[in-house]
Image (spheres, helix red, strand yellow):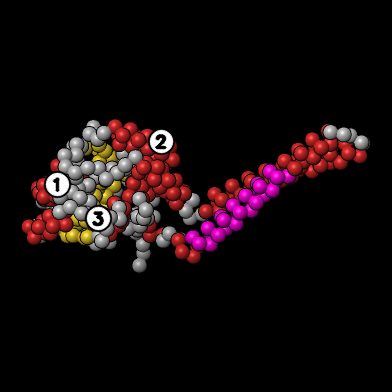
Amino acid sequence: MNIAFVIPVYNEEATLEKLAQGITTHTAPHPHRMIFVDDGSNDGSWEKLLALRAQYDTVDLIRFRRNFGKTQALAAAFEHVNADVVITMDADLQDDPKEIPRLLEKLEEGYDLVCGWKANRLDPWHKTIPSRIFNWGVTRGLFGLKLHDVNTGFKAMRIDVIKYLPLYGEMHRMIAVYAAAWGYRVTEIPVQHHPRRHGHSKFGVERFTRGALDACTAWFLTRRGQSPAHLFGVIGLMATAIAAITMGLSLLSAGFFIAQLMQGGDLFPYAALGVTLFWATLSTIFGIWGALSIMGGILGELLVHRFGRIAPDRYITEEHLSE
């Protein structure tokens, strides 16, 4: 089994040597390579990585001009992976290299992606509590994916999993979601987690708002990405139906207004006129909404047909064909 480690690095000078040593020790006897991506570090991380490359013939390096983020770091490294299995890890030593054999053992049971679940997470409360809310509410609620920690950066996956990942923005959080949506077998194992001893966390509370938006995007792409008209068309038809109903109510109110006016009423007809205008306004709003939704769905279908149709080989796990 040939293994590639993909490790984004941002200002982690103090941990890199020990991390490389740990990976080397706990990956034997499997052949492996370590791809470190320096994501615009401004400490001595790059110099330390150059020294590691001189020390280990298994180290490959990529350097960004500035800090572009974890998703871009993973995407850049995945372009250079040539292995059977990819393991992603953080560079801060909170992920313990001694857990590598256990991830590989679980993978060999027939799974395609194994997440390292930090069962006893040693992070401050302002990171752990929002993370639990996100994992239980968004991941299980939207996707029905029974993972304790979809955000974990400690993952082992077969090479096929990374081929079609839409890695942009901050979609690294959704790797397990996309894998499960495409039919890959996804699971998790509890792993030991260490408190951060060097440097400081690169993520703030705002990452959870971005994560929620990413989850909504992932839900659309995995559920309706190939048939957007099915979603927007339903919304448009519902809005159009409401527009028709409110237009009918508006016409009824208008008829009532005219009848009262012809009978010589004083105030009451004008109250009926107000109701008529109210229903007419609602009918116009929902009518425009419905038309735009249907048009948006059709436009989405055209774009998918032209640019985004998924190749069938993404879904194929095995073939037995006659020559």
Tag 2: residue type?
Gly
* CA distance for labels 3 and 1: 15 Å
Q: Nearer the viewer, residue 134 or 5?
A: 134
The magenta stretch is 280-304
Q: Nearer the viewer, residue 80 or 82?
A: 80
Residue wearing tag 3: 39
Q: Indicate which label's residue lies in the foreground, 2 or 1.
A: 1
* CA distance for labels 2 and 1: 34 Å
* CA distance for labels 2 and 3: 31 Å
| CB within 8 Å, label 2 to label 3 | no
The residue located at (24%, 56%) in the rendering is: 40
Going from N to C along the chain, the mark reached first, 2 or 1, is: 1
Left or right: where does residue 99 sit relative to residue 273? left
Look at the image and tell me whether residue 3 can be seen: no
Q: Indicate which label's residue lies in the foreground, 2 or 3.
A: 3
The residue located at (16%, 57%) in the rendering is: 46
Residue wearing tag 1: 15
Residue wearing tag 2: 137
* Residue 269 among magenta residues: no
Asked which secondary structure carries label 1, the reply is loop
Q: Crowding at label 3, few (<14), some or many (≥20) Cα neighbours within 10 Å?
A: many
Disc sitting over residue 115 in the figure: none
